[in-house]
Image (cartoon, rainbow, N blue to C red):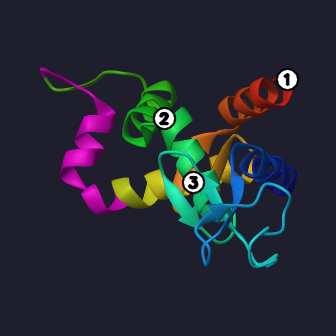
Amino acid sequence: MNKEIYERLENLAFKETIPFCYSCYKYAPTGRCKTCFSDDLMRHLEGVGVEFGTGWVIKALLEECLEQPDFEEIFEQSIDDCYGEEVRVGWLTLNPAQIIKNEDPISWEMAKSEYIDSLVEDGEIFEFSGNYYWVNEIEALLVESEAS
């Protein structure tokens, strides 16, 4: 799944950029510079810059078009779904997620990290360059770009 998404994102990166000869500082839309005849070209993404490869283009497009999930909120909701939103201890009514987060922040972060990893393994989340995105939102972006 991730490989297929990456390949489609790479195709989007090629579609959204123009080959660019840095030596001559000119666009080379044919894939070869008309001045120096080089085919060792960078990619130019309007408003971002030029660089070799497509990873930076994919990162820029994802950051521009999508928002990263708020894992703190998502994980907290998951805990609330598992343990309920309130527990009574004596005469106190408390939120289990808040208690765990405040009383044992290390285990909270470890459990949240494991939860994120499980979302990635299940194919719900796509990780790219240290950032996470919902797969369904990437799919929608790709379908929209492939249709145009």
- Per the image, is 106 magenta? yes
Is residue 87 toward the left or the right of residue 58 in the image? left
Disc 2 vs disc 3: which is toward the camera? Answer: 3
Residue in front for this viewpoint, 51 or 113: 51
Magenta span dominant secondary structure? helix
Is residue 134 toward the left or the right of residue 77 in the image? right
Q: Which residue corresponds to the image point at 50% horizontal and 25% vertical from the top-left?
A: 81
Above or below, comparing residue 141 to residue 113 in the picture: above
* Residue at the extreme front of the image, as rendered: 35
Residues drawn in magenta: 91-107
Q: Is mark 2 on a helix, strand or loop?
A: loop
The residue that mark 1 highlights is: 147
Quadrant where the image shows the C terminus: top right
Q: Which mark is residue 59?
A: 3
Disc 2 vs disc 1: which is toward the camera? Answer: 1
Q: Position of residue 44 (x, y in %)?
A: 62, 56
Who comes first in sequence, dot 2 or dot 1? 2
The residue that mark 2 highlights is: 67
Q: Which residue corresponds to the image point at 84% horizontal and 30% vertical from the top-left?
A: 146
Q: Which residue corresponds to the image point at 48% horizontal and 57% vertical from the top-left?
A: 113
Q: Position of residue 131 (x, y in %)?
A: 51, 54
